[in-house]
Amino acid sequence: MATSGIPHRYTLGVLHGDGIGPEIVPAAVLIADTAVAATGAPPITWEELPLGRRAIEELGEATPKATLAALAETDGWLLGPHDSASYPEPFRSELNPSGTIRKHFDLYANVRPAKAFSGDAIAHGTDLVIMRENTEGFYADRNTHLGTGEFMPTPDVAVAMGIITRTACERIAREAFELASRRRKKVTVVHKANVLKLTTGLFRDVCRDIARHYPDVEVDDFHIDAMTVHLVRRAREFDVVVTENMFGDILSDLAGELAGSLGIAPSLNASQDRAMAQAAHGSAPDIAGQDLANPVAMILSTAMLLEWLGTRHQDEALLRAAGMMEAGVAATFEQGTSTRDMGGSAGCRAFADAVATSIGLL
């Protein structure tokens, strides 16, 4: 542990993915290396591993078993976006790489911050975190050991399973209340218990039960449809929002746009002992290879991973590095540098270089 006086040396996996992944993931690695070096901590060891289309072409698997085994030996990893919809069969119909990794390591918490950095934000002052349950709910692929959880008994009938369990609700609720305890001490539970009374009603009630253990944290709750309106009208009033899988996916995309762009929307997939940095957006194949991608979401996701590791290992240097990464992004925006999706003209590489320069000036 870092508290022993011996600096912890970290090995992080690097999965470039598809589309813009090979552009934004190296940008995040650059910024992480710059921030860690600025603290004087030992450099991170990066282990590149095959995944996605490259892995299909070279190894015949979208998520090679050797990659999963190697990830288990790392301290955490960066996952670039994948474009599984374009994979050839049978890979297109299989569980996608992200889902395979999440299931394999039981990454039950999807932490998705939305923070407004610049004047391009629709909802100025937004600074919230959506805590999304990541293993079940109304996304069918979360609910089965094998298969996708969807089936068609006849050509005209399609069925999908939606599962909510007390155990999964309890652990995501604890994560939400623990996070809120370190932030502004407010949790909002999002559900649809007026219609989905048993499933999301269970989610709401379990969150309320967990809330009793956190008397200093304020709690309220909203139906999912009302919550979309509240986010648009008063996003700055929310702190930590906890919800089931599909609702969390929808709300986090909305919150990302309110904060400025999906290109700046980071996320962390985590369990008690594993964590994966993964930008909330997709692979954007239409701009891949053109140096047009916004690397901010991947950079901030990587900062979240460093913060998670720093907290886990009580590593103050790594915590400082994570803070410097976010501060470097903020300073770059303040200087008027941004990518095209945010009204600027900087390319992916130029923006990353500008962030690295900003960190050097902190």
Image (cartoon, grey):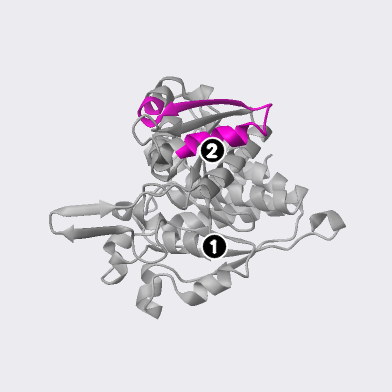
Relative to 277, residue 259 above or below: above
Q: Residue furthest bottom?
A: 59
Disc 2 and disc 1 in contact, CB within 8 angstroms: no
With 102 as the anchor, is 281 left or right in this view? left
The answer to whether residue 122 is visible is no
- Work out whether residue 126 or residue 263 is closer to the camera in this orientation and state it: 126
Q: Residue furthest right?
A: 5
Relative to 141, residue 220 above or below: above
Residue in the image at 29% along x and 66% along y = 92
Query: Could you tell me residue 100's position as x and y percent?
Result: 44, 64
Q: Residue furthest front?
A: 198
Magenta stretch encompasses residue 222: yes
Which residues fall within the magenta stretch?
202-228
Of callouts 2 and 1, the N-terminal one: 1
Magenta stretch encompasses residue 275: no
The residue beneath circle 1 is 105
With 286 as the anchor, is 143 left or right in this view? right
The residue beneath circle 2 is 206
Instruction: Tell which tag, 2 or 1, sits nearer the viewer.
Output: 2
With 346 as the anchor, is 206 left or right in this view? right
Identify the disc placed on residue 293.
none
- Work out whether residue 211 or residue 226 is closer to the camera in this orientation and state it: 211
- Work out whether residue 192 or residue 102 is closer to the camera in this orientation and state it: 192
Dot 2 crowding, Cα within 10 Å, few <14, some 14–19, many 20+: some
